[in-house]
Image: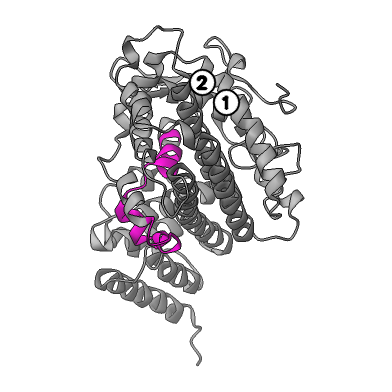
């Protein structure tokens, strides 16, 4: 079989290699070693090429697969190449790898190591000069959905009740043999898993949301965004509207079940994904194999979910960047922001991301490291007022920043409005004090 230039096969992934070793430690917690070729596991931005969603390395067929061009023949060729490449990966799995979920940890290493050393925001900017991130993300989601549907057609015939019934008994099979039909099922699951994992990663890169894949929290975040979408999230984000009504009950079954917990480890994710795909055994819907429909629409939903998550994070990060860049009072800014955030006694995810990013940027851009702020537990209004009174000059930029902080997670509530009012009063008082008196 001819592989794409630089493309990895299952035989390129020995456990002793420099690939990330992901699994569970003695306390059943997710563990990961740094990805080789990625500084401290960080998905760096400069100088890398980006593959299309799901390909093992660079763009399938070395750049022929352009997400802004819908060419079915090129798409099919790219999918068939990867389908055969993943057969090599599946051939290296034992029955226990499949039933116990260990296949996912191996695929994760297979999918992320070389991919994350090549994918970067700069590549997209060079390839699609002048095209906004939203447009590129939209087209990559559509391309991934096409790939998923094509591959679903290649593997649909393997989804029979007899094959699914063998999943539970594979643990007792020879460690060197997996039934041929079951191998095709695993190629389908591996293809879809890697495709959606890469798609989520692409979207994070395009929105310039940094992911440190040596950090278990960031690794789990990528996994959660790519795979653990709940039915409620699908409805809330409105992505179900793009799915034909005849398919919605099928997808509801696909997304039903318990929520995954990070502490359960990667093999549990593998079992979870395996069980999800059992619904592909069934009567074709409107004449189309179930695998084709499930692959297409779950990939589309996964992409739209990733877009909702990472675009929102990009919005919050962008706000923090603007606040830190525009402020005339970098020492006062974090104190005012935190006062507004804590006004209602709750911290939303958006607020937590905003304050952490803001503190980092103020330190980087203005060389401000406030240990007193870092050690603070409860916000003391008197201390904030003292700091504001001791700050000379016009504080109108501080009041304006406070208003923007209050809106980061939605509509301003009554507690936040009260906090903004107090800040305005102090800023107005400071402005009055600065007005020179006339004889």
User: Magenta residues, as a range?
Assistant: 219-247
Residue 368 magenta-highlighted: no
Is 36 above or below relative to 345? above
Q: Residue at x 52, y 24 (%)?
A: 109
Is 18 above or below relative to 429? above
> Is residue 50 something that shows in the picture?
no
User: Where residue 358 sits: x, y (%)?
Assistant: 48, 53
Is 364 above or below relative to 191? below
Helix, strand or loop status at disc 1: helix
Give the camera-side residue of 292 and 198.
292
- Residue annotated with mark 1: 86
User: Where residue 60 sits: x, y (%)?
Assistant: 70, 37
Instruction: Quadrant for residue 82, please give it.
Output: top right
Residue 90 circle label: 2
The span from disc 1 to disc 2 (Cα, nearest Å) is 6 Å
**Pointer 1 with pointer 2, Cβ within 8 A:** yes
**Residue farthest toward the bottom in the current orientation of the protein:** 439
Q: Residues within 10 Å of mark 2 (few under 14, many from 20)?
A: many
Q: Residue at x 44, y 68 (%)?
A: 404
Tell whether 121 sits left or right of 360: right
User: Where residue 69 sits: x, y (%)?
Assistant: 71, 54
Residue 233 magenta-highlighted: yes
User: Where residue 175 sits: x, y (%)?
Assistant: 41, 7
């Amino acid at each position: 079989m001819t592989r794409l230039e630089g493309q990895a096969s299952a035989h390129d992934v020995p456990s002793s290699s420099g690939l990330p070793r992901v699994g569970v430690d003695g306390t059943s917690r997710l563990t990961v070693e740094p990805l080789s070729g990625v500084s401290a596991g960080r998905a760096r931005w400069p100088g890398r090429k980006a593959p299309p969603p799901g390909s093992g390395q660079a763009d399938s067929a070395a750049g022929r697969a352009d997400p802004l061009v819908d060419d079915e023949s090129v798409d099919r060729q790219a999918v068939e190449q990867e389908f055969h490449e993943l057969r090599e990966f599946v051939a290296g799995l034992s029955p226990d790898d499949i039933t116990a979920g260990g296949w996912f940890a191996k695929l994760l290493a297979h999918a992320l190591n070389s991919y994350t050393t090549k994918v970067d925001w700069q590549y997209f900017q060079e390839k699609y000069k002048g095209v906004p991130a939203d447009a590129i993300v939209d087209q990559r989601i559509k391309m991934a959905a096409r790939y998923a549907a094509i591959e679903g057609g290649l593997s649909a015939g393997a989804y029979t009740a007899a094959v699914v019934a063998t999943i539970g008994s594979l643990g007792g099979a020879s460690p060197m043999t997996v039934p041929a039909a079951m191998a095709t099922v695993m190629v389908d699951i591996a293809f879809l898993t890697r495709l959606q994992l890469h798609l989520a990663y692409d979207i994070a890169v395009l929105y310039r949301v940094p992911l440190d894949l040596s950090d278990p929290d960031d690794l789990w975040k990528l996994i959660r965004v790519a795979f653990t979408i709940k039915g409620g999230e699908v409805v809330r984000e409105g992505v179900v509207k793009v799915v034909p009504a005849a398919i919605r009950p099928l997808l509801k079954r696909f997304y039903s079940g318990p929520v995954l917990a990070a502490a359960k480890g990667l093999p549990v994710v593998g079992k979870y994904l395996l069980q999800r795909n059992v619904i592909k055994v069934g009567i074709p819907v409107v004449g189309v194999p179930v695998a084709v429909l499930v692959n297409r629409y779950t990939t589309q939903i996964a992409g739209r979910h990733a877009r909702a998550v990472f675009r929102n994070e990009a919005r919050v990060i962008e706000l923090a960047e603007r606040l830190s860049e525009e402020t005339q009072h970098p020492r006062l800014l974090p104190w005012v922001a935190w006062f507004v955030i804590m006004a209602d006694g709750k911290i939303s995810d958006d607020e937590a991301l905003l304050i952490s990013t803001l503190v980092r940027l103020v330190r980087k851009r203005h060389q401000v490291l406030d240990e007193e702020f870092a050690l603070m537990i409860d916000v003391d209004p008197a201390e904030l007022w003292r700091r504001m009174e001791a700050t000379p000059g016009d504080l109108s930029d501080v009041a304006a920043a406070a208003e923007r902080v209050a809106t980061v997670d939605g509509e301003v509530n009554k507690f936040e409005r009260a906090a903004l009012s107090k800040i305005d009063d102090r800023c107005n008082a400071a402005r009055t004090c600065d007005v020179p008196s006339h004889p």
